[in-house]
Image (cartoon, helix red, strand yellow):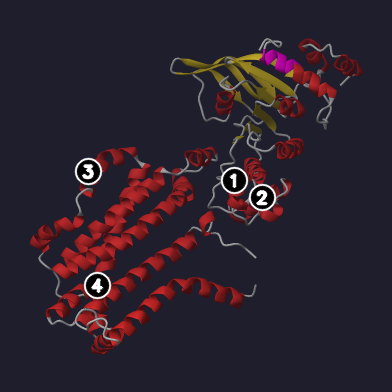
């Protein structure tokens, strides 16, 4: 099979997921034009597209997406790295697990969005508030899945590594970490979902910039097309983050039977 | 082997004494020796005083019913367990500690490493980079998998995976290879093929092989010496002085096999 043919076949396979949204969009536009959906309930896709163009030209959209993306990434980096490091430590060391796991499991049972009033009291509506909430939300899926991944590494493989004289560092890099990677990716994708969710809620309740703020402002002025646009952009950003994670997953889990494509 | 010995084997009146007598050859250096080795886990005594001296280059088979302590014996030999009492001497000519490798019933390959990198795991601390790759490739050729070096383990069959595990165990040129029922999970035909491969590399590389098995036919087909363990003690120690390659189903093999089975099950009083 030539490279071009393979590429086209892949494009066909991957674009099939977009067929349904496109059909829904067309139906929606037709229904709006026919007057079946009132404009003040749900604007037509063309009205949303017009709002998109207006905000794009004014620069407002890019600025708000930038602010939201920065919050998401910083919060994710902070919460994700703490969760990853603690997950590794608790997976490898029984002492570390004994000291911290009970506490972490207790905190995990508090919905992190319940902390919003407290966070507003602590940080006001500054950046720290949003970053703190995102970090907290992202922390647990990464922590739990990293820990689970390390604990589920086949002990027979670890014994094998010891027999062949691997040092602790080598054992970790060549056996434990690759073995835990599939579970870590599950945690990563789950955390990305939580990241957007937390950010939307936080920005909707308390913010002076960002996508959530843009949507809330638009609601005040009854700009329903902008509200719908914000929601769509959240959906697209979420999908983008998930696609990136899946690409990373495919690249690093080539050995996994679930990711092996048939060779020609 | 003398003609008298063959005659003895043919007539079927075979005792430990006659078998031992016919194998008088130059005594070779000891590969390892268990001296009064005992092992207990809590109250349960698994090994109850094992004395076993094995010459370098021997193919030794250890047979026993499940739970007799044969796997524990092997784990002590491989340094995975320590004896509760007694000692294990593992010597080599130059006085350095002999390298022991162990192969298990399951191949224990790293699923995230290519076949060749799995073999190179056997060179941890011995060789790196290009040299490691070359040695690993040579061993893969030895076990007949030269063309599969770049594959993931998940696409190999059970027998092929076990051959990769064999290559990994041998790539560091061990002086002792401990085999814990390595063929136990394979189908009958693959087993026979693997037995041939095992015998071939053992002859070529000259390591001391210690094969734990519950398959008496396999033990008799491959080993120079068969040790039967029962209730943590050596119950029977038998030399197998038959020429190689041994033919599957030969009457001499069947005769020895019968003796060992009789011993295991108390002369038919099952």
Q: Are marks 3 and 4 in contact (CB under 8 Å)?
A: no
> Quick check: is B148 in the magenta stretch?
no
As measured in the structure, the alpha-carbon distance from the residue carrying label 2 to the one carrying label 3 is 50 Å
Q: Are marks 4 and 2 in contact (CB under 8 Å)?
A: no
Find residue A80 and report its horizontal and vertical position in percent.
30, 58
Residue A68's disc number? 4
Find residue A15 and report its horizontal and vertical position in percent.
47, 74
Identity of the residue drawn at 87% across and 16% down? B5
Same chain for mark 4 and mark 2? The answer is no
- In the picture, measured across the screen, residue B121 lies left or right of residue A34, that is right
Earlier in the chain: of badge 3 and badge 4, it is 4
User: Quarter-wise, where is residue B221 in the image?
Assistant: top right
Image quadrant containing the C terminus of chain B: top right
Classify 10 Å Cα crowding around label 2: few (below 14), some (14-19), many (20 and above). some
Above or below, comparing residue B186 to residue A216 in the picture: above
Residue identified by numbered label 2: B135
Q: Secondary structure at mark 4?
A: helix
Identity of the residue drawn at 24% across and 69% down? A71
Residue identified by numbered label 1: B123
Of marks 4 and 1, the one in the foreground: 4
Residue A103's disc number? 3
């Amino acid at each position: 099979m030539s490279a071009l043919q393979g590429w086209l076949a892949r494009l066909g396979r991957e674009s099939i997921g977009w067929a349904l949204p496109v059909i829904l969009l067309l139906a929606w536009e037709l229904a709006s034009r026919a007057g079946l959906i009132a404009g003040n309930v749900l604007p037509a896709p063309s009205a949303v597209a017009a709002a998109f163009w207006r905000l794009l030209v004014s620069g407002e959209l890019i600025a708000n997406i930038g602010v939201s993306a920065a919050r998401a990434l910083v919060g994710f980096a902070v919460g994700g790295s703490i969760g990853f490091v603690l997950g590794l430590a608790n997976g490898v060391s029984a002492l570390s697990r004994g000291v911290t796991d009970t506490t972490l499991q207790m905190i995990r049972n508090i919905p992190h969005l319940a902390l919003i009033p407290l966070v507003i009291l602590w940080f006001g509506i500054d950046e720290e508030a949003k970053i703190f909430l995102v970090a907290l939300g992202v922390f647990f899926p990464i922590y739990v899945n990293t820990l689970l991944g390390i604990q589920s590494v086949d002990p027979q493989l670890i014994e094998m590594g010891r027999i062949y004289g691997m040092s602790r560092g080598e054992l970790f890099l060549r056996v434990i970490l690759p073995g835990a990677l599939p579970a870590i990716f599950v945690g990563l994708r789950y955390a990305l979902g939580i990241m957007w969710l937390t950010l939307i809620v936080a920005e909707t309740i308390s913010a002076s910039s960002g996508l959530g703020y843009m949507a809330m402002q638009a609601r005040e002025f009854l700009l329903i097309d902008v509200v719908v646009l914000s929601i769509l952009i959240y959906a697209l950003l979420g999908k983008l983050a998930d696609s990136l994670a899946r690409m990373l997953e495919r690249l690093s889990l080539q050995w996994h039977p679930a990711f092996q494509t048939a060779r020609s | 082997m003398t003609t008298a010995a063959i005659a003895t084997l043919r007539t079927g009146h075979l005792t430990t004494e006659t078998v031992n007598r016919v194998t008088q050859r130059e005594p070779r250096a000891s590969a390892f020796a268990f001296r009064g080795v005992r092992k207990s886990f809590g109250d349960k005594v698994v090994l109850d005083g094992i004395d076993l001296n094995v010459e370098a280059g021997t193919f030794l088979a250890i047979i026993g019913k499940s739970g007799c302590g044969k796997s524990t014996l092997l784990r002590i030999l491989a340094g995975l367990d320590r004896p509760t009492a007694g000692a294990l001497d593992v010597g080599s000519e130059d006085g350095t500690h002999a390298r022991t490798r162990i192969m298990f019933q399951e191949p224990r390959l790293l699923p995230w490493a290519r076949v060749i990198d799995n073999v190179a795991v056997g060179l941890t601390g011995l060789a790196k980079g290009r040299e490691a790759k070359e040695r690993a490739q040579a061993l893969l050729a030895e076990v007949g998998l030269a063309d599969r070096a770049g594959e993931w383990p998940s696409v190999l069959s059970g027998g092929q995976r076990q051959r990769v595990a064999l290559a990994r165990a041998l790539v560091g040129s061990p002086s002792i290879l401990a085999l814990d029922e390595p063929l136990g999970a394979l189908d009958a035909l693959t087993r026979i093929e693997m037995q041939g491969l095992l015998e071939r590399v053992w002859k070529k590389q000259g390591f001391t092989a210690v094969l734990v098995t519950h398959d008496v036919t396999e033990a008799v087909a491959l080993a120079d010496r068969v040790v039967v363990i029962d209730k943590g003690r050596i119950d029977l120690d038998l030399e197998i002085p038959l020429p190689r390659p041994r033919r599957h189903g030969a009457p001499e093999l069947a005769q020895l096999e019968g003796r060992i089975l009789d011993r295991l099950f108390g002369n038919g009083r099952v």
